[in-house]
Amino acid sequence: MNCEECHDYIDAYIDNELDVSATVLVEQHLRDCIRCQQLLDARKTVVTLINDSQVRFEVPHSLLGKVQSVIPAARSRLKQRSSSRLAVPWFSVPLALAATITIMLGLVYTNQRGMFDRSSAKVLAQEVISSHVRSLLGTHLLDVPSTDQHTVKPWFNGKLKFSPPVHDFVNEGFRLIGGRLDYFNGREVAAVVYQRRQHVINLFIWPADPSHNTAATAFTKDGYNVSHWARDGFEFWAVSDLNGAELSTFADLEIQQS
Ligand SMILES: [Zn+2]
């Protein structure tokens, strides 16, 4: 891959939209090319800024109040004047404005709901596998290398807006080796990392609807085993090249903790 191709792929790479082979090619180029690495950092900064609630435009309450006060008045005028089509223009402006702002508010709300509401499990599967592969390719598997859950769990405090559950299962053959921050859909998620023999398991965790508990669902994709479930207000996605049976055992251990 050359710089030009890397530039073409960089946004899709940040959004985790590339398949595993393209991800590997981009990663290889980025490792050798400082200029493209700088471009990546710049793009990531923009993504972070866009997703920062402090720079996001919020509709002020005063405007909301005005819109809400206009809607009933406009409705009653609509009723009074419905017999005459010619009367429409003088009240259609605030009505259209109200409708537009209502749609905008809906979009803002939709955007801020659960981060993966719009994503299908298929897209997510691709993202977790790409992140898993990325974590193994470079030197960025662990931000906090530690086998102590009482070191790893507090490390996430202040770095994420949620506190992910962190457990060690060394006695069952799944050793906690640390954690790191990872990135899906422009949002940060927790990656808790385990090791079984020579296999690494990435357990990705992010907040979910607390009423939405699901049993573990397992599947294989691109040679990786994936198991995901929702419990106690968190979504869990475990991915590894470990065999499916042992990954399911790991999932059961984690589920029993909650
Ligand atoms: Zn380059």
Image (cartoon, grey):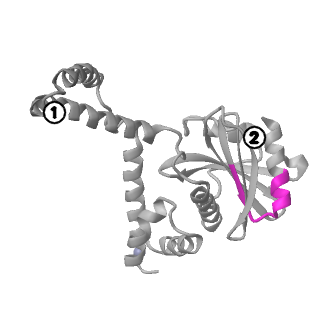
* Residue ID at (10%, 29%): 87
* Residue ID at (25%, 31%): 98
Q: From the viewer's perspective, is residue 52 above or below residue 39?
A: above
Q: Mark 2 falls on what kind of element?
A: helix
Which is more foreground, mark 1 or mark 2?
1
The tag on residue 198 is none
Q: Is residue 238 magenta?
A: yes
Q: From the viewer's perspective, is residue 38 above or below residue 233?
A: below
What residue is pinned by disc 1?
A: 93
Q: Which residues are magenta?
A: 237-249
Callout 2 amino acid: Gln
The picture quadrant for ligand 1 comes to: bottom left
**Residue ranking furthest to the right:** 171
The tag on residue 149 is 2
* Residue ID at (38%, 58%): 43
**Residue 256, image x, y percentages:** 83, 39
**Residue 185, image x, y percentages:** 50, 52
Position of the C terminus, as image quadrant, is: top right
Q: From the viewer's perspective, is residue 36 above or below residue 227?
A: below
Q: Is residue 109 magenta?
A: no
